[in-house]
Structures are given as C-alpha cells and as structure tokens.
Amino acid sequence: MYNEDNTVTPSIQLNSQQKTVSGKVVDATGAALPGVTVTVKGTTQGMITDMDGNYVLADIPANATLVFSFVGMKSQEIVVGSKSTIDVVMVEETIGLEEVVAVGYGTQSKKTVTGSIQSVNTDELSDMPVTTTAQKLQGKLSGVQINQTTGRPGEGMKVRVRGQASLTAGNDPLYVVDGFPITGDISSLNPNEIESISVLKDASSAALYGSRAANGVILVTTKRGKTGKTAISIASNYGWQTVPQKGRPDMMNATEFAQFKKESLEDLGLPVPAIWQNPSQYGKGTNFYDELLQVAPMHDQSISFSSSTNNFSTTAVLGYLSQDGVIVNSDYKRYSIRINTDFKVSEKIKTGFSVAPAYSISNSPNTDGIVWGGGLINNALTIWPIFEPKNEDGSLKQNFYEPITGTRFANVLWNAEAITNETKSMRLLTNAFAQYELLKGLVIKSTFNFEHFDSKFKNITPSTVGATTPSVASAVLRNSEYNTWLNENTVTYKKSLGEHNFDLLAGMTIQKFMSDMSQITYTGFADDRVPTIAAAKNIDRNPFWLTGVPGTYNDIQEWSMMSYLARVNYNYKNKYLLSFAIRSDGSSRFGKDNRWGSFPSASVGWIASDENFMKELEKLSLLKFRASYGVVGNNNIGNYTQYATVNAGSAANNAVFGSSVYSGSIQTSLPNSSLTWEKTKEYDLGFDAGFFNNRVNLSYDYYSRKTTSLLYSVSVAQESGYSSFMANIGELKFWGHEIMVNTKNLTGKFLWETSFNISFTDNKVLSLAGDIDRIYSGLFQSNITKVGERIGLLYGMVWDGVYDNQEEFNNSPKAVASAVGTIKFKDVGGDPDGGPDGIITHGGDNDDRTVIGDPTPKFTYGITNNFSYKKFDLSVVMSGSYGNDIITWLDQSLANLDGNYN
C-alpha cells in the first residue's frame, strides 16, 4: 500500500489468485525506458521492457512485489495488490552524502570520511572516448596533476598526487586494484571494467599502505554484479586523432632555406654554388615533419554482462582497443577480459574470485628524444626541405646527400617504415577471497592475489637505415617477466552502542615479488631479411650498467614484505568523527638495522550542519570540518642498495695464473645496514560544504608535508677506494591549497552540471647531504636543486643577443668559441666577489649558468561541463596549468644560426 509520503509498505494479501499486470516505465523526462528489468521478488519470473518501455507479466500472485531495476537508476519495489496496471517513473541514482566510497581496506560513507579523499564513479567516466583510465581522470581531481609525456599510442600518463615527493626514489602513486597493490600503473586496464576510483591524497587516508604511500594511493574498484539486476551492455567508440596545425614548429620552406644559405655565403664573401643561386626554383619543397604525421583512427569496443541473484553474482567485460599513432607505422592494440564472481555459500560465508588477463601489441617507432638522440620527430625538422623523400618510382629514398658540403641525412620516413620496434605484453591480475561472519558485525576475511607480467621487445634496425648505407645492421631482443603474490588476512568489527558507532580493523599481509629480465644485442647479420642471433656477426656482451648503452645482460630482482595494520573509526551521533590507523612494514629493501618501520595517522571531523544551532540556516545542506596528521613512506630505494655490490662481469677484473686467464670479481660499492625508506609527515586541514539542497558543493584543503631521510648518493673520500655510497640525508617541504566546486546549474528536462577544481602548490629544499648545497639533474645538467630554493629549477645560460659587429664583440664578455654573429650570453658570475668576470664560461668554478626557469606550475586547474537533454548528452572537459616553464630542446640545434640544418 502507498503511504501519504509516497513510500510503499508491503502488505500481505490473503488472496493468492493469479493475475496479469502490465504498464510502462519512463524516466524523469517522460521518455520511455527500454531494457528495464521487471521481476517478481523472490523468484526468477520476469522480463525486460520493450523499445517503448512497456511490459506484461502474466500469472503472478496478487500479493507479489514487483522489482524494477535499471543500471544507473534507483531500484523500486511495488506491491501488486488489486492493481492490474502499474506505471513507473525511474529516477537516477544520485550521489549523496550517504554514498559509499572506497578507502584503504574497506569502504566508508562519504559523510563520515575524515581524510582527504576524492572519488569518481563509472557514470562520470563512461562516455569519454579515450584509451586509458588516466586520461579519463584528467582535469577531474583537485591536487592531482596528470600529464601526457609521450604521444606514442597505448602509453601511460604521468600522475602526480600533490606534486613531487622525492628526488631519486620515484614519484608515482601506488595503484591498488580491488585491494591488490599492483606493480606499475593501470594503463593496461580496460576503463570499461572500472566501477569507481578513489584517490587517497593525504597521509592520514593513505597510512594503511605504509612505506609505499608517500606519493598518494589510487584505489580502483572494478564492476561486480548487483543484487536483482541482469544487464548486457555494448559500448563502441570510434574517433580519430591529429596533430593540430597550431603549435607545429614554424620551419623554413625550401625557397626560404635556399635563400638563407645563399645570403650566409654572400655575407662571408664566399662563392655561391649553383645549388643556392636560384632559391625560387625549389618552391615550398618538403616538410618532413608534416610527412611523418597521419590522421590516426581509433576504435574501442566493450561488451559487459552482469547477473546477480541473492546467492550468486558475476560480471564479465570483454574489450578490444585499436589505436593508430599520429606517426606513420605506429599503432597499439589491446585485448582484455575481466570476470568477477561472488558466491554466498550461507548467511555467514561468502567467497569470490576475479581473473583479468590483458594482451597488447605495440608498434612504435622511436619518436621521442632530442636531435641526434634517435627521435624521429626532432630529426625530421633538421632535414633540408629541398630534398624529395621519394624516388621516381614512388619508393622512399633511404637517405640524402649534398655533395658540395658533404652533408648527409637519414630519411626519417624510411626509418619509420624500416625499423621494427615492437612490444608484445601480457598481464594477468587474479584474486580470490573467502570471508566468514563469526558474530554479527565480526567478519574474518582472507584474500590471495597474484599478478603475472610478460613482455617481449624486439628492435631491428636493417642495414638500409642511416645517413650512409649500407650501415651495420643491429637488433635488440629483450624479455621481461615478473610475478608477485599477496596474501592478506583481516578482521573487521562494526558495532553500535547507543549513539556510539565503532568500525575496527586489524590485519596481516605478506607479499613477494620476483622479476627476470634478459637482453641480447647483436649486429652484423648478413641479410636484413634474416635478423636472427645465429646470423649475427657480433654479440655485444657489455652489460648495460657498465657501458651505459643497451648490451647483453640478465637482471634478476626480488623483494618481500610483511606487514601488520590496524584502524579504529569512531563517531558519536554520526557527527563527531575520529579515526586512528597504523601500519608496520618489514621489508627486504631496508637495511638490517632498520628492517621495520611504523606509519601512524589520526584524523578528526565535525559535521557542524547537524548541530541544532545550525538548523535555522536553511540554505546550508552540509558543513563538515576535517583535520588529519599522518606519516607515510617511500620504499622505492632499490632492492639491493643496502648491500656491498660486486662486479663479476668486467674483463678488467680478470687475472692470469700461469698460462690461463681466470675471471675475477671486485667490490664496487659500500654497504649501509641502516638504509631505510624516505619518510613523509603531513597534516591536512579542510572542510566540505553544501548549499541549496546540495545543488552547490564546495571542498577546500590546505596541506603541509615534509619529506625526510631522502635517498642520496653521498660522496666519500677517494682514499676509501670508492666514490660514494647510498644514505638517507636531506629534507623537502611541500604545501598547497586545493579547491573543488560542483554545481547543478539547471535541472529538469535540460540538465547542466559543472565541476571546477584548482590547486596551488609550492615546495622548498630544506637540506641536502652534508655540506652539499645543490645537485644537478636532467639532460646536460639542465636542472638544479638547491637548498632554500624549489626542486628542479631550470638551469642554463641567459641569452643576451648576438655579437652584431666587431666593436660590440671587442667590448663584450665572450667565450673561447665566440665570434661576430654568434650568440652572446650574459656574464652572471665567476668573480671572487660574486659578480661578472668578463668571461663566458659553461660549468666549472666560473660558471655563468644560472636559474632560467621553474617547471613547477603556480596552479593547475580543471573544469567539466555536463549537459543532457532526454537521450542526448554532451561533456566538455578542460585541464591545464599556469606559471610553469618548459625546455624546448630542439631549439638548441634548430636555432643556433650555424645553417648546417634547417
């Protein structure tokens, strides 16, 4: 029966007569809803609505209760009673304060969360036609910067939670998929498998992951069957990618380049050869950068099946992705399957398992890298535009040669087609669990997780590739494999005593990781069509760590960890909130004198809007204050860093005894039994507010954290026989503000929602090792990290014009190689008193390099607008950063005025 407040109270009908019920199901706008599941509660009898939203159920008891369910909509239960026609309006499953979000080792209602956690569910991600999950998150999370660092298809994104937290121990967050901390990122995960994502940003919320949580934790929950729902869905996206004209390098065309060469020779008083005497004959010529590019199609298909009863549920997702790259001869394919199954053995026992294999094939020419570093894109820009890329028969030329100056170029178009650069990877994630409810609210749970990864890389460079051909053909074969397993055993207990509510957790985990990588590099096979090891003339036996270039080597890595964890969540009247957590990690990566570390945290919250004195503020829906403090760590310090290492692979270690040569070994580093993880201590202050029945929501966080015990290579006296050893020295400080605003601008038939976030961040180097006040990093030492300054500032010479004439040259500071017409750099130091010394010097004691930029943005931001009208929707997502400087390395070769290249 219906109550006055429109709720439904089940009633028992004494008459069990069979009858027929029909009706129509529509959404809030009145549009018909096909595919809605209509079942008789407690039975398997039912059907789905047709294309017009209609249904008919025959031979059902008059006292039956009908259940209406549809993905993304609130389920409804209606008693049949005397009615023969039941029409239903389905409403969307809105996200409110009682929404359950994933936290470390469990879930918690959004209202009672006291840490800095941000979540995104599948409804917000499903319509975005992008290939990776990280792309779907771009611009949607405050304090989380997601950058694309390469254009190669299938590659992952760089994710930073609240900025950089370390100098040498890595800055990637920890990814946890269905409770399993995986190796690497989630780029191989089909986004259509995901139900929700939670980002644990502060140390308090991430503390249960201990020595791996300093860079933040990203929890991924995959789709599982929902009770009473059966659904089949097909998602298909097709699109294409191009490199926009705006932003492409503005290079000289053939006529402009020939004119430039002609004038430069005339300025030097040299004769102009015939090749440059008539520049207009070349027209626009060839833009090799544009020739490398293509319109790249991409398509993504997924089929999802989900079914659930009271005792059994399963979800299966099959996915196929094909993405061509914007560079010719580049593409990526991914095949994936996920099956999640749960079984309710009894009222007290539940079990489940998941299996998720993914296989990918990537064909990606070497596009990245600076000029002469092998990168096709930058090398394409150097080629003279007067050259034609193809022969008269339409085939590609292998290289170009200009006989007057002897300048040679490899044809990057030929290289892109001729070089094989293929990676085949297979990744398997699987887990199983069993839980037993010993007493009401007391649950014992055990899980076993396993991850396997296997990758085969093949690079073959034939003899037809190079500025001169034939060249020496070469190949690199690399096989990588790792396995990791994790066993976790936890006990949870939930209990309410009056208005006091407790949620307790205790557990123990054991994890083991093993990897094996083998590489062989060989050269000189006689026939490009048979690039096998057996056909090779030479095998490069120098190990990578000895020469710094790929060679032939084998690398085996292992680590293991045992942990204990506990958490207490308490609230009084659901408005005074308190949480304590601690994790102790024992890791093989740490020195024997620092094998164990503990990571505690505490947080509090107050839902002020539930106080009686706040009730008069009718426009205020929610006001919650939060504060937290915690300690987390970064254990990415290497697997054997604490030990003295031995080199047994160098011929320099060999010795002669008698007439025989015997291999030898030598100790190459000092041990450090006290080596331990980097520690990050952080506090967070914030509030959440809702207005106008939560049509406007605002969140704010201020955080401050300090990272200590930085992993650093400390110099030691040469008399020791060594140059350095690894130690924990140094401190960094980070702080920032995060603001998130969500608004429902329009409701009704036409919906418009906006989500905006902005994050301000800053950092400072407090100390480094011993008397060292700066360290250099990056390509050509282009970054400097100095005590009292920000991390990784850009470091180099300051452009100060050009030496226009001899008089200016004579009266200006200059370098040894300076001449009239060359670049003039600013004289910034070298004098003992700290001023200019009249000489331009790069490096050394009289270095004229200085800070020339800051790669850290002043703020990052994102804004998403969602519009919908009936069955049509539109989403516009933007993200960006402001105030950060970048280095454009290609300018070092393409703007140097030498004229050898374009």
Image (spheres, helix red, strand yellow):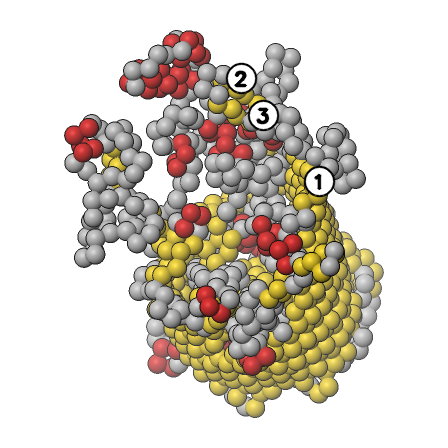
Mark 3 touches mark 1? (CB < 8 Å): no
Rendered residue at 81%/61% (across/down): 45
Write down the residue under mark 1: 538
Q: Nearer the viewer, residue 753 or 687?
A: 687
**Residue 526 badge:** none
- Dividing the image into 4 quarters, which one contains the C terminus? top left
Rendered residue at 46%/29% (across/down): 381
- Dividing the image into 4 quarters, which one contains the N terminus? bottom right
Q: Is residue 89 visible?
A: no
Write down the residue under mark 3: 468
Residue 326 image point, x, y percent? 56, 34
Mark 2 touches mark 1? (CB < 8 Å): no
Q: Which one is closest to the eye, mark 3 or mark 1?
A: 1
Q: Nearer the viewer, residue 63 or 794?
A: 794
Mark 3 vs mark 2: which is more N-terminal? 2
Amino acid beneath label 3: Thr
Q: Residues within 10 Å of mark 3 (few under 14, many from 20)?
A: some
User: How far separated are the C-alphas under marks 3 and 1?
Assistant: 20 Å
Q: Residues within 10 Å of mark 2 (few under 14, many from 20)?
A: some
User: How far separated are the C-alphas under marks 3 and 2?
Assistant: 17 Å
Write down the residue under mark 2: 388
Along the horizontal axis of the image, is 530 left or right of 468?
right
Amino acid beneath label 1: Asn
Q: Is residue 223 above or below residue 526?
A: below
Amino acid beneath label 2: Glu
Residue 443 placement: quadrant? bottom right
Secondary element at tag 2: loop
